[in-house]
Image (cartoon, rainbow, N blue to C red):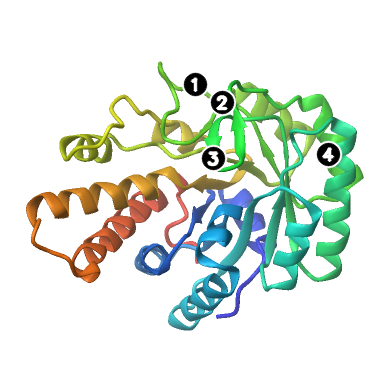
């Protein structure tokens, strides 16, 4: 099945009270694990690439891997740029086969954010590509995106922002955080902000970034075999499921994939120190990705059976 945009995905998700998982990809094994999970659960998928992933794997390799995935399954799959930081980067992705791009100009002033986002929207829409933007800032670290504190989205700004930019979906800040080292205490999400935004933007798809839940079995495995991620916390899955039942149509998941792979590989080498063939440790790592993604699809997103 050819790559699709998120337009129809989000329409169905909004009406059905579920969300689509946007899973970050960096290599073949991650893509295969995600696709296998989607196929077994019959879930639509968004596979997204960060600026760092482009630098690491090269766009052409990722695009060809996406093409291979589309020949292997009939699932609806969108190919998305995560946290594009400039018009030039978004344009390059549009020109190279992405079906969706995010322009993150949230660190600029409100007016600058509008101007940059509108420029991206105009170019992307002319080429049949949809655009996500962001209002507010998440705490945490994700590659070039760094913030020490939350800057919650102001519901009073969302209508003007969407109407002036023509953006197709909006990432908001309600208490999620980038990265695995997230919360010192219990995570709390500002559902009052989400509710108010959904009132201001009826039937409009909302996005949550920094929404990995950091399963503790991965944290414990990594620490058991020499890692140092003790105390890492994420967003509880029940809170994410509640958000998915509201206006949130896309939930980004990256850290959980990294934790699943790292835990699997550390465990494998602890048990099989004699192994040196990458296939010996990447095969179970791929299976760990698949199992984790299936868990997210069923327990958090509610998108199983929706393909």
Q: Is residue 299 visible?
A: no
Whether residue 255 sits left or right of residue 100 in the image: it is: left
Secondary element at image label 1? loop
Q: Position of residue 95 (x, y in %)?
A: 75, 72
On the image, numbered disc 1 is attached to which residue? 188
Q: Position of residue 57 (x, y in %)?
A: 51, 65
For the residues labelled 3 and 4, say whether their Cβ atoms are less than 8 Å apart: no
Q: Secondary structure at mark 4?
A: helix
Q: Earlier in the sequence, mark 2 or mark 4?
A: 4
Residue depicted at x 15% and y 54%: 269
The circle drawn on residue 175 is 2
Tag nearer the camera, 3 or 4: 3
Image coordinates of residue 128 in percent, x first then y, are: 78, 70
Q: Residue at x 57, y 60 (%)?
A: 55
User: Is 127 left or right of 265, judged from the image as shown?
Assistant: right
Q: CA distance from mark 1 to mark 2?
A: 6 Å
Q: Secondary structure at mark 2?
A: loop
Badge 3 density bin: few <14, some 14–19, many ≥20, Cα 10 Å: some
Q: Marks 1 and 2: CB-CB under 8 Å?
A: yes
From the viewer's perspective, tell me whether residue 20 is left or right of residue 293: right
Instruction: Residue under label 4, please give it.
Output: 113
CA gap, disc 4 and disc 1 = 27 Å
The residue labelled by disc 3 is 142
């Amino acid at each position: 099945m050819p790559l699709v945009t998120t337009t129809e995905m989000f329409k169905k998700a909004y009406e059905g009270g579920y969300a689509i998982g946007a899973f970050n990809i960096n290599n073949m094994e991650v893509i295969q694990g995600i696709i296998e999970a989607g196929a077994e659960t019959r879930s639509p998928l968004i596979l997204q690439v960060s600026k760092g992933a482009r630098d690491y794997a090269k766009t052409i390799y990722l695009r060809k891997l996406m093409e291979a995935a589309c020949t292997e399954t009939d699932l609806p799959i969108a190919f998305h740029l995560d946290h594009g930081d400039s018009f030039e980067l978004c344009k390059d992705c549009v020109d190279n086969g992405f079906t969706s791009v995010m322009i993150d100009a949230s660190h600029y002033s409100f007016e600058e954010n509008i101007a940059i986002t509108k420029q991206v929207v105009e170019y992307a829409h002319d080429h049949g590509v949809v655009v996500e933007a962001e209002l507010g800032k998440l705490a945490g670290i994700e590659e070039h995106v760094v913030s020490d504190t939350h800057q919650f989205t102001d519901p009073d700004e969302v209508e003007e922002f969407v109407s002036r930019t023509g953006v197709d979906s909006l990432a908001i800040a309600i208490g999620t955080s980038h990265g695995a080292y997230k919360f010192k205490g219990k995570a709390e999400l500002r559902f009052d902000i989400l509710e108010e935004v959904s009132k201001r933007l009826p039937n409009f798809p909302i996005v949550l970034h920094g929404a990995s839940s950091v399963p503790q079995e991965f944290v414990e495995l990594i620490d058991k075999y020499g890692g140092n991620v003790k105390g890492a916390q994420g967003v509880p899955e029940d809170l994410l499921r509640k958000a998915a039942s509201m206006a949130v149509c896309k939930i980004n998941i990256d850290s959980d994939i990294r934790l699943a792979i790292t835990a699997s590989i550390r465990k494998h080498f602890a048990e099989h120190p004699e192994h040196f063939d990458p296939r010996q440790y990447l095969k179970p790592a791929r299976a760990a990705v698949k199992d984790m993604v299936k868990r997210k699809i069923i327990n958090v997103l509610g998108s199983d059976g929706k393909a």
